[in-house]
Amino acid sequence: MSNPAASMDFADMEPDDARNLIAAAAIPTLDLVKLAKIEPTPKRFVIPKLAPAGEVTLFTGPGGAGKSLLAQQLATALAAGTPTLGFDIAQSTAIYITCEDDAEQLHWRQAHICKSLAVKMDSLAGSLHLASLRGGLDNALALQPSHGEFQLTPVYKGLEAQIHRTGAMFVALDNVAHLFAGNENDRGDVTRFVNALNRMAGETGAAILLLGHPNKSGDSYSGSTAWLNAVRSQITIDHNPETDVRLLNLNKANYGRKGETLRFIWHDWAFVLESDLPANNAQALRETVQASADNALFLACLRERVRQKRAVSEKQSSSYAPKVFASMAESKRIGTTRLEAAMERLFRINAIERGEMGWDDGHRHPVIGLRETAGVRAGNTSAANAGDYP
């Protein structure tokens, strides 16, 4: 490649100005003449749609949603070269490193993942590398002192060497809270850390999956927006605890189609597509999903009536809740029978109760009717999830 600085006259420049100009001009540029003769190739994905090769993908979701399990399952499928969750995956070496789970938990999950994928565990030797750093006091990949130079740690260098040594094309790092020693709200700290991982991914060609948690404000990442800006790919996982259904969302995709969603279910300590469930399990799931959705519709109707200060009752009368709700748009016209069943379920899980509604009848007598329980209204009990089916 040509260097523009070579043809410049620096005789009349101040030394510092000349050095700065030379440094700026020394940035290598693409040879467009050469590239014009080469057919460009699209970005290669180690895991279709989810994990581009040579890039860092940020993978976030609330605790208990299944990030760790999914990352280990994807690593296993890669090592075995077997499909999972509808992805056709070419065989390649994979690494999964956790800072949160011990070796026994890794073994437990691995046994169930292998069973689900019909893979013998010993057949993965050499192609799947699992490691637990739980309890380590120096797991950070980089050090960022408040006054000093950004430094890569021995852990970073060891990981990079392991990727080169094994030829791994997929690396899952679980999770960022243990591996990042800087201030998650400092854009500089975050950008330097992610850039270090981007460099590792670029130099090794591996797809790096970096697991993290969302923040309490509802953002899909915790800390500075630099987390999202510094990566080219981000996926999130959502969990409905009533049904164990997960939704994997492709939120940022510079190399693919943004906004795609994959739906799957937790079954016997592994994730499977609903279509792959045994018939009896699939039927039970459909019934649970419908029940959860009906509960949500019942509560939506109840909230609207409470907002209007128009009480309903659980007893047969002109204000009988299922009958009143059946004609409301909020019920999606599911009918009185399903609304009656939803009311019984919500009573059973203590999500609704009969009590004072908080207004009077015009004669200083408190109105009594059907209401959500105090804990559910505050969002403090599991019953509150009765209406959270996505």
Image: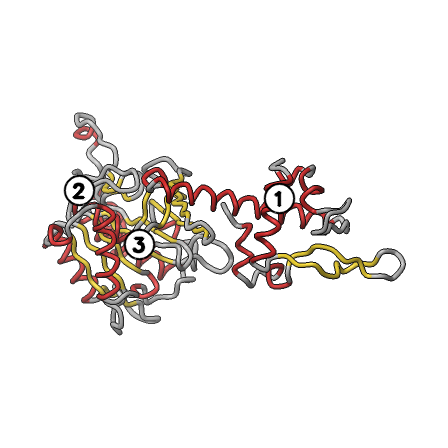
For the residues bearing labels 1 and 3, Cβ distance under 8 angstroms = no
Q: Which residue is mark 1?
A: 339
What is the distance, in whole Å, between disc 1 and disc 3 at their CAs?
Answer: 33 Å
Q: Secondary structure at mark 2?
A: loop
Specify the quadrant of the image occupied by residue 285: top left
Judged left or right of residue 231, residue 28 is: left
User: Residue 98: x percent and y percent?
Assistant: 26, 62
Looking at this rendering, what residue extends furthest in the right direction? 363
Q: Secondary structure at mark 3?
A: loop
Judged left or right of residue 370, residue 251 is: left
* Nearest to N terminus: mark 1 or mark 2: 2
What is the distance, in whole Å, between disc 2 and disc 3 at their CAs?
Answer: 20 Å
Q: Is residue 375 above or below residue 91?
A: below
Q: Is residue 132 visible?
A: yes
Q: Secondary structure at mark 1?
A: helix
Q: Tag 3: residue type?
A: Trp
Q: Tag 2: residue type?
A: Gly
Looking at this rendering, what residue extends furthest in the front direction? 316
